[in-house]
Amino acid sequence: MLPAPYDRLHAALREFMPDERLVTDPLRTLAYGTDGSFYRLIPKIVAIVEAEGEVVRLLNLCRELKTPVTFRAAGTSLSGQAVTDSVLVLLGDSWRGCTIPPGAATVTLQPGVIGAEANRKLAPFGRKIGPDPASIATAKIGGIAANNASGMCCGTAQNSYRTLASMRLVLADGTLLDTGDAASRAAFAVSHGALLSGLSDLAARTRADEKLAERIRNKFRIKNTTGYSLNALVDFEEPVEILQHLMIGSEGTLGFLSEITYNTVPEHAHKANALLMYPDIGEACRAVALMKPTPVSAVELMDRASLRSVEGKPGMPDFIGGLGPDASALLVEIRGEDAAALDANIAAVSAVIAQTQTLFPPTFTTDAKLGESYWKIRKGLFPAVGAMRKVGTTVIIEDVAYPLDRLAEATVELQAMFLKFGYTEAIIFGHALEGNLHFVFTQAFDTDEEVDRYRRFMDAVCDQVVRKYDGSLKAEHGTGRNMAPFVEMEWGPQAYGLMKEIKALLDPQGLLNPGVILNNDPEAHLKNLKAMPAAHPLVDTCIECGFCEPTCPSHKMTLSPRQRIVGWREISRLEATGADAARLGALHEAYDYQGIDTCAACGLCSTACPVGIETGLLIKAIRGDRRGAVAQGFGTYVASHTAGALSVARTGLKLADLAKRTLGDDTANGLFEKLRTVTGQRLPHLPRALPTPTNFTPLPQAKASADALTVVYVPSCTSRSMGPAANDPEKTPLPVKVEALFQKAGYRVAYPEQLSSLCCGMPLESKGLAAQADAKAEEMVRAIWAASANGTVPVVLDTSPCSFRLKKHLKDAGLQVLDLVEFIHDHLLDRLTFTKQTEPVVLHLTCSTRRMGLDAKMKAVAAACATQVVVPEDVGCCGFAGDKGFTTPELNAHALRHLSKDIPAGAKAGYSNSRTCEIGLSDHSGLPYRSIVYLVDACSTPKAPATASTRASEPAF
């Protein structure tokens, strides 16, 4: 039961919002209420809004019932500005609009657009948005603007404040204003004349006070997100301009931003990088000051502790280990609109660097891979500390800014403070051109002594930054709860008074994100601290940053990887302490479906996680722990009777196909869905693109000559049992097609012995039956080792998840196991002649293809076959996940909900390299999806006479 008045609010919200978008259960309020900060508040209600009208009505209700509201975009913020114990408003799927006018000088974005997605859409025009936070691949425009987030290159000139053109916003009283629309501005001037007059008066008073006005200007010459954007009061006189610029960096405390139009900035393709080593931080900072006026794009500072944290990591330069104890590094990037401009800029910057004392001769490189390795050093710093921390501690990243001419002495003092307060693992890095430093350290909050240590340290930092250097306590991460008690300390009572007046004008009831930016509690930053209890060794290093979420097929349906870990942490804590048995039971009950059943375990989350966590491994471990003796025994039986299990699967496919042919698709599907409901979802869902059964048996192999070009082909379980769908015009089973293609390219095709019994173990692993899965993988390794003449012949698997699993499992580096896409790209493209089809090709890059790093090769294979290749931009993991498309079809539907919009006109087929993925893709696109082998075969002819082969059609039984 919700307490009053939230019970009344919930009832009122249900009148215009469906129940599935009003979350009140204990698991999801905990999980959805989590952001990237080290604060924890659990909302009473999580409302997932899909339209401006819903926001307006929600705000009106909250104002009527006096219930505070917090808005959340991606939840990557670090200062506690996106958590609440009241009403949390999340963005649904409908906030992803992106409009680019001719020339792309501006871009209009809704708040749910991820920053990197906006840049991908702008890239063809050579433009990008100005803000470039490190979280841009996850952070959404609403949060980027509301926090005035910046980053490595944008500085203070290209942040949201400086590149804002116009916005649509909803104020606390539910009023909508479009600052880019003259009619809206005129109507607002009539309805809110007093508000605009108040802003004009504030600005006039501020400008009239020359000392205050100059202080504000000086404070924003370096990065500053502490408090409100007071520079709006001195930069603009027109009240609507003041209002919309105050919204930037207001962290949801002044209104809801429903759309923003940015002035875009150039994205130069020509880049050069240099990693410069200096004997100490002082010389490095002197170099930064000298480079400031030059045409340099980014200068990243790294202290010795930072470099030490990544020593010995793959790709790290060997010389890092031999650097002295005070050494520091600068990572410098230079850009140019063309090669000539880049060369000129390099020359200008190099002339300045020559005036400094570097440990090694400075060298700029235009090699993209080498430049990327340098940036990996920089981007690996934060996760390096996070991965090394003790279980139960959290990793904290603070960001401050100093005047550039005093950066060196401030940095040395900061290093001394780390030692004084016992933060021996702390590192410093940052955007040196702007005087902006990040420092990272680990902190426990489980004892009063640890909380007090943190308090004393932060007091010392604030005293140093403000009183000695007049710097910024928050340069780009937002004020949040973390620095709210120190805003007045930084700005002084007069400027702080302006902020309170701004808040009173725009949110007189104080209902929008209370406690954030302005907070009268001097210890607010020490309250509601997030515990990080041990949950499982596989995920204990999770820092809850949320970078994983865009990769997850169940995100926004049930839980994301971050949310699964949050939920399991709480379950583990309650189990360890024995506290609140009722809450523990409710969490367990909800987690079975939300956390376990709907996890695809695809592993894509690990590709985005800064500490490399694969949450699916946790879920598989939980599944395994729950398998009792009967389930383990059944798994062992299936593993030892693979051929029989596949025969049963073929029988099921045959019966389902017979029912569909007899009753018709619609009738058969309706009947099966009714039976699923009656049996409590125990029967499988039958997709419309259900495969027909097939049974592949290799032909007897003739004795090969010693110099015969040979490949060992291992068709997967699914390829050997699942043929094309009944409604697919293509009727040839995949193994037959692969065999023919290899022969067309001049290869003799060999098969391992006992093929019908072989399996890589993937189906067993996904069920948590790790021992049985590994036994099957070992059996396959032995078989293909023998078939490949002890590794001298390449081995090809035709299903990407199987290829990936076997590659991970291999212990002998001498065995050449290749995915089918990899083999076609590396060995067949040059042996075939291609005629490109004009019909568009739709390509699906499976999770395992991406994780093997084969996405570029798959695109290249498709590009050899077609003039137009489309990879749907909003599809990652398809969510079919082996058998999830049969047992949990809603996961597949959710993951592919955006697929159809990206299917180009004229496309007649889609291509991939996983048979089960292709079932769901076919169902949700309206196109038959099949292996890319079919495309390659249709578009190619042999360069040399093909190896002859005769194969009759084979019965499925």
Image: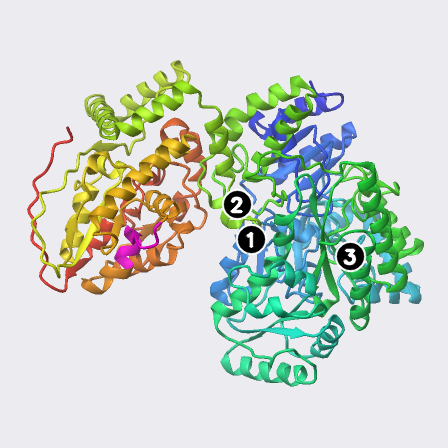
Q: Specify the amino acid type for callout 1.
A: Ala
Q: Residue at x 27, y 32 (%)?
A: 690
**Residue underneath mark 2:** 550
Q: Are marks 1 and 3 in contact (CB under 8 Å)?
A: no
> Which span is picked out in magenta?
812-825
Q: Residues within 10 Å of mark 2 (few under 14, many from 20)?
A: many
Q: Nearer the viewer, residue 467 or 731?
A: 467
| Residue 413, above or below 580 | below
Asked if labels 1 and 2 touch by Cβ distance under 8 angstroms, the answer is yes
Among the 4 quarters of the image, the one containing residue 248: bottom right
Query: Position of 373 compared to 74: left or right?
Result: left
Label 3 near label 2: C-beta < 8 Å?
no
SS of the residue under disc 3: helix
What residue is rendered at 78% in x and 67% in y? Answer: 221
Q: Residues within 10 Å of mark 3 (few under 14, many from 20)?
A: many
The residue that disc 3 covers is 242
Mark 1 falls on what kind of element?
Answer: loop
Does residue 624 appear to the left or right of 307 in the view shown? left
Q: Which residue is mark 1?
A: 137
Q: CA distance from mark 2 to mark 3?
A: 34 Å
Residue 866 horizontal/vertical position (percent): 27, 58
Q: Which badge, 2 or 1, is on the more N-terminal residue?
A: 1
Q: Position of residue 563 (x, y in %)?
A: 59, 36
Q: Nearer the viewer, residue 517 or 749?
A: 749
Q: Is residue 614 left or right of residue 82?
A: left
Q: Earlier in the sequence, mark 1 or mark 3?
A: 1
Earlier-in-chain disc, 2 versus 3: 3
In the rendered structure, does residue 891 fall within the stretch colored magenta? no
Local packing at callout 1 (Cα closer than 10 Å; few below 14, some 14-19, many 20+) is some
User: What amino acid is labelled 3 in the image?
Assistant: Ile
The type of residue carrying mark 2 is: Pro
**Residue depth check, mark 2 versus mark 3: number of the one nearer the observer:** 2
